[in-house]
Amino acid sequence: MRERTRNGSWVMAALVVVGLAAGGCSDGSDGGPRKADATSSASAAPAEVVTAASVGQLAGKLPQARRAQLVGEVQQVVDGWIDAAYLSGDYPRTDFAGSWPGFTAPAQAKAERDGDLMSNRDIGASIDGVEPQKRQLKLDVLSVRKRPVGVTARVVLRFATTGDTVKDVRVAGRLYLTKGKQGWQVFGYDVTKVAR
């Protein structure tokens, strides 16, 4: 399930090596949403689930300030996909066009074909909404001359659905990104989606 750009073969190979060195995706010990404190008001709104993003493995050198900037840039791309494909929008719905902002045209076409995996197309018509539980992002970075040239974004997303289809859904895997004229873009992916 990986899409390559014409000039991205060497980047892909390097990212796979970095990704393998980093190991598989893990949703860690977090068991889901936090329970309300006993002293909290019953009417208090649940805390917003934000993406926990950081640099994982680094091949090469990258100054600390540039690392923080890179995390912000890549997180914007990944969050754009997560929100458009899974968390945002009015449910029930069947239209998931535009669910892959920040993907290259070939990767977007592939993701559209894999719409049941890369979005909520498979369950969108039978749910009333989604409740995010976890958003995690680790970046494995390939840096050349102190400049990031490729990123493997290890993603974990967990959410619950409401409506006719009540499920706990976990989306996890890797997005492969390279930087072009339009900034960081996803050119390939290796993702799983499990609903229980």
Image (cartoon, rainbow, N blue to C red):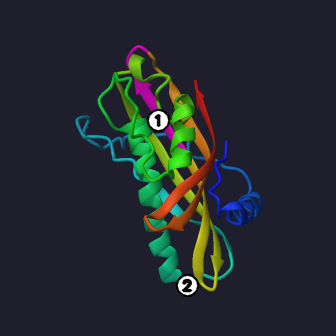
- 35 vs 19, left or right, is left
Residue drawn at 75 percent across, 61 percent down: 13
Give the distance between the C-alpha atoms of the residues marked 2 and 1, in whole angstroms: 34 Å
Total numbered badges shown on the rendered structure: 2
Q: Is residue 40 visible?
A: yes
Looking at the picture, tell me which residue is in the foreground, 193 or 44. 193
Locate the C terminus by quadrant. top right
Q: x, y (%) of residue 119?
A: 48, 34
Quarter location, residue 116: top right
Q: x, y (%) of residue 124?
A: 42, 24
2 vs 1, front mark: 2
Q: Which mark is residue 90?
A: none
Q: x, y (%) of residue 48?
A: 34, 47
Residue drawn at 49 percent across, 67 percent down: 71
> Which residue corresponds to mark 2?
63
Mark 1 is surrounded, within 10 Å at the Cα level, by few (under 14), some (14 to 19) or many (20 or more) other residues, namely: many
- 12 vs 48, left or right, is right
Is residue 161 on the magenta stretch?
yes
Secondary element under disc 1, as helix, strand or loop, is strand
Identify the amino acid type marked 1: Phe
Does residue 14 lie above or below 104 as drawn? Answer: below
Report the span colored magenta.
Answer: 156-164
Residue drawn at 30 percent across, 44 percent down: 39
Q: Secondary structure of the magenta portion, mostly?
A: strand
Q: x, y (%) of residue 171?
A: 56, 39
Locate the N terminus by quadrant. top right
> Which residue corresponds to mark 1?
159
Q: Reading the chain from its start, which is encountered first: label 2 or label 1? A: 2
Secondary element under disc 2, as helix, strand or loop, is loop
Residue drawn at 39 percent across, 47 percent down: 49
